[in-house]
Image (tube, rainbow, N blue to C red):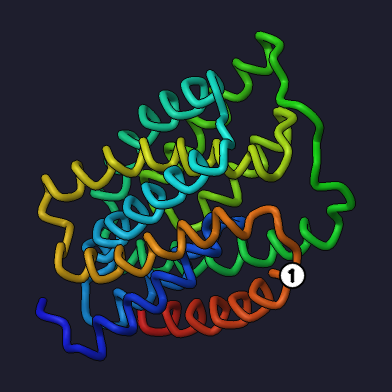
Amino acid sequence: MNPTILDAFLLMLVGLVAGVLNVLAGGGSFLTLPMLIFLGLPPGVANGTNRVGILMQNIGAVWSFRRQGILAGPSVVWAALPATLGSILGVYLALLTSDRHFQRILAFLMVALTLGSLLSASKRGVEDGGGPATQPEHRLGLALGFFVVGVYGGFVQAGVGLLVLAVTTWAGFDLVRGNALKVSAILCLTALAVALFAWQGRVDWLLGLCLGVGAAVGGILGARLTVLAGNRWLRWLVTVTVLVFAIKLWWSA
């Protein structure tokens, strides 16, 4: 579809906010996916198109983390490879799901993961889990965790960052390095997901690129803001918006 100037502006703005939020924690797609649906895309096409913004966002975030000297090292392989393999299964399941069922699933996940994120944030007393685990069993656990992340990310993407942070925290990464590992892994699995969705004709490239411009800037800003405090107000603002979008999605399905 051909977006109006207002549509393009809204997508860039939402993409920017979502890009920052995705790098800081996760859940930005709970804003961008409903916006794409409300602009007229079928839910299945919106699911594929959203990945273009995610891809551009994580390119910007990885570049910014590298410039700041924050590298995840060999752990990237233990995370990115299984996540990418898992995304193949996730995309396959997404392509089998009808638009109506996908919209209902998305609305449910929006509420469940957003409320879960708020509860975990309120109980989190320490954000630094120490150095990353290096034991073989921890590496295996990291790989298995990221395979599950890949399946989920391939299916819906929205909220995958929250799952990644749970895995990296278990593995002993602090918030900053956990986020660097997160964007590296999601970049890899999203690149494959975009190719698979595009192969099935489930990507609107014009809307995706409009979203991606804002998301790329948001990814760079999010990487810079990762180590800073003061983003709690943004989390609450986005939470209210996500819940409103979820209610509207559920009743319009």
User: Is any part of residue 109 visible from this angle?
Assistant: no
In the displayed image of the protein, which residue is found farthest to the right?
Answer: 125
Observer-nearest of 204 and 222: 222
Q: Quadrant of the N terminus?
A: bottom left
**In screen coordinates, is 149 left or right of 217?**
right
Secondary structure of the residue carrying tag 1 is loop
> What residue type is disc 1 on?
Gly
- The residue drawn where x is 30% and y is 84% is 9
- The residue drawn where x is 45% and y is 72% is 31
Please say if 106 is above or below 199: below
Observer-nearest of 204 and 77: 77
- Rendered location of residue 159, percent (x, y): 52, 56
User: Is any part of residue 148 visible from this angle?
Assistant: yes
- Rendered location of residue 134, percent (x, y): 69, 15
How packed is label 1: few (under 14 Cα within 10 Å), some, or many (20 or more)?
A: few
- The residue drawn where x is 15% and y is 62% is 205
Q: Quadrant of the C terminus?
A: bottom left
- The residue drawn where x is 65% and y is 35% is 168
- Rendered location of residue 233, percent (x, y): 70, 77
Please say if 72 is above or below 231: above
- Rendered location of residue 4, percent (x, y): 17, 88
**In screen coordinates, is 210 left or right of 114?**
left
Please say if 217 is above or below 84: below
Query: Looking at the rendering, which quadrant does residue 241 occupy?
Result: bottom right
Query: Looking at the rendering, which quadrant does residue 12 occupy?
Result: bottom left
Residue beneath disc 1: 230
Query: Looking at the rendering, which quadrant does residue 165 occupy?
Result: top right
Please say if 207 is above or below 182: below
Observer-nearest of 145 and 2: 2
